[in-house]
Image (cartoon, rainbow, N blue to C red):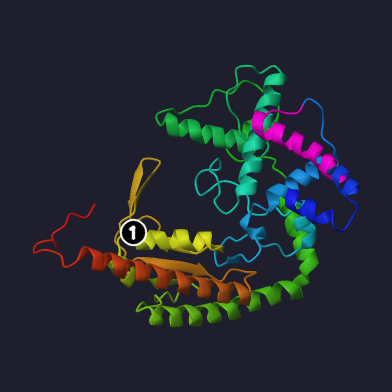
């Protein structure tokens, strides 16, 4: 409820009652504002209603809760069990990005904000507990063994010539085993999986698998038809029964930046999971440079758009994504034609270019 909605409510219920409710809500909002401004653990604990209001406000910032969102990615925030969704306050997408758990997830602004605030509050609590020298921290879904294992792996990366771990006698299994294997971890994933499978039953799970296969065929047909309308083609990927790809050669030729712009346009139009892969991307990961990054090949022959029929996808996801993709392609081609007409005919020798 924002101020405008409260004003409208005064036409339905006595204004004095509505204003009283508005004042009560402002009390919750003042606590939330202080948390966001200071990033510290509140001196006095919050009521459950304030916490739930805050979590619900964060949840609506995640794309899986957007009204009108359509997902065509391999890892969409889909939940089969409403019990699991409620248990997590519909904060389903998770945190971090590939290779960086601390990175902000574009599809999950609410979950990312939750993660950042949690880290800040935990840092404040660690300092309150007497660890004054600590400068940063982050919360991970692991216990002693796996946490230590990751620390050791990081140290090995920083000191590749090191051969030994100095271990003071600590009679706790995870401390010793973490130099070999991981120990105890959170039971939360197991709980979610069990609830989901008990909710679906074997027949429900098989139905989801069957629907996914049917919608893969539907997505392939729709994507192929769309590609042909725009002078592109559906790429031949016979060994991949989940993901599909459509070439973007024509888009690349119309404007150098059009391919990456397409990805941005789809994202802002609430098409999540569709990945656009331009030519010539280069990425360095842990000292190793990958050419043609994201295309899984040093020299893939064309830029392309990737979409997937993952479990839980719906017919509405397919049709909405195709409709929005079609509009984006038309808009970009129109812009490309305008740019070409403004530039005019290129001079002789202009085709000799250095490609970065």
Q: Position of residue 84 (x, y in %)?
A: 76, 57
Q: Tell me which residue sits at (68%, 37%) in the image.
A: 143
Residue that mark 1 sits on: 257
Above or below for 228 versus 32: below
Q: Position of residue 301 (x, y in %)?
A: 29, 67
* Whether residue 166 can be seen here: yes
Above or below for 329 versus 27: below
Above or below for 236 versus 154: below
User: What is the span of residues highlighted in magenta in the rendered image?
Assistant: 21-42
- Tell me if 94 is positioned left or right of 82 in this view: left
Magenta residue check for 60? no
Looking at this view, name the residue that lies furthest to the left. 348
- Tell me if 334 is positioned left or right of 201 in this view: left
Q: Position of residue 124 (x, y in %)?
A: 68, 25
Q: Quadrant of residue 141?
A: top right
* Whether residue 178 can be seen here: no
Q: Position of residue 29 (x, y in %)?
A: 76, 39
Which type of secondary structure does the marked residue at label 1 adopt?
loop
Magenta residue check for 22? yes
| Residue toward you, 342 or 216 | 342
Q: Quadrant of residue 116?
A: top right
- Tell me if 51 is positioned left or right of 240 in this view: right
Q: Quadrant of residue 125?
A: top right
Question: Which class describes the residues within 10 Å of circle 1: few (<14), some (14-19), or many (20+)?
Answer: some
Predominant SS of the magenta segment: helix
Q: Tell me which residue sits at (28%, 68%) in the image.
A: 253
Q: Tell me which residue sits at (66%, 35%) in the image.
A: 36
Give the number of marks. Answer: 1
Q: Tell me which residue sits at (90%, 46%) in the image.
A: 16
């Amino acid at each position: 409820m924002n101020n405008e909605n409260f004003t409208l409510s005064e036409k339905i219920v006595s204004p004095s009652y509505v204003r009283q409710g508005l004042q009560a809500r402002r009390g919750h909002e003042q606590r939330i504002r202080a948390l966001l401004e200071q990033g510290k653990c509140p001196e006095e604990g919050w009521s459950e209603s304030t916490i739930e209001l805050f979590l619900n406000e964060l949840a609506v910032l995640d794309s899986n809760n957007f009204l009108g969102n359509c997902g065509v990615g391999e890892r969409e925030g889909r939940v089969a069990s409403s019990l699991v969704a409620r248990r997590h306050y519909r904060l389903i997408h998770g945190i971090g990005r590939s290779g960086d758990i601390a990175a902000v997830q574009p599809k999950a602004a609410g979950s990312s904000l939750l993660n950042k605030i949690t880290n800040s509050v935990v840092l404040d609590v660690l300092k309150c507990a007497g660890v004054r020298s600590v400068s940063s921290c982050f919360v991970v879904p692991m216990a002693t063994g796996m946490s230590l294992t990751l620390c050791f792996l990081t140290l090995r990366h920083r000191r590749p010539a090191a051969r030994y771990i100095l271990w003071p006698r600590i009679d706790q299994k995870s401390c010793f085993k973490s130099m070999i294997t991981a120990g105890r971890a959170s039971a939360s994933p197991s709980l979610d999986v069990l609830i989901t499978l008990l909710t679906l039953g074997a027949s429900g799970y098989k139905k989801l698998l069957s629907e996914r296969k049917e919608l893969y065929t539907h997505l392939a047909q729709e994507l192929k038809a769309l590609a042909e309308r725009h002078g592109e083609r559906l790429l031949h990927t016979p060994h991949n029964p989940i993901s599909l790809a459509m070439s973007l050669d024509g888009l690349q030729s119309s404007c150098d930046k059009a391919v990456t712009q397409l990805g941005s346009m789809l994202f802002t139009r609430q098409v999540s999971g569709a990945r656009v892969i331009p030519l010539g991307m280069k990425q360095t990961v842990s000292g190793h440079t990958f050419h043609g990054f994201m295309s899984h090949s040093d020299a893939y022959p064309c830029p392309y758009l990737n979409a997937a029929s993952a479990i839980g996808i719906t017919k509405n996801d397919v049709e909405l994504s195709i409709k929005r993709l079609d509009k984006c392609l038309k808009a970009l081609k129109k812009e490309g034609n305008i740019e070409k007409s403004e530039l005019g005919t290129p001079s002789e020798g202009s085709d000799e270019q250095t490609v970065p």
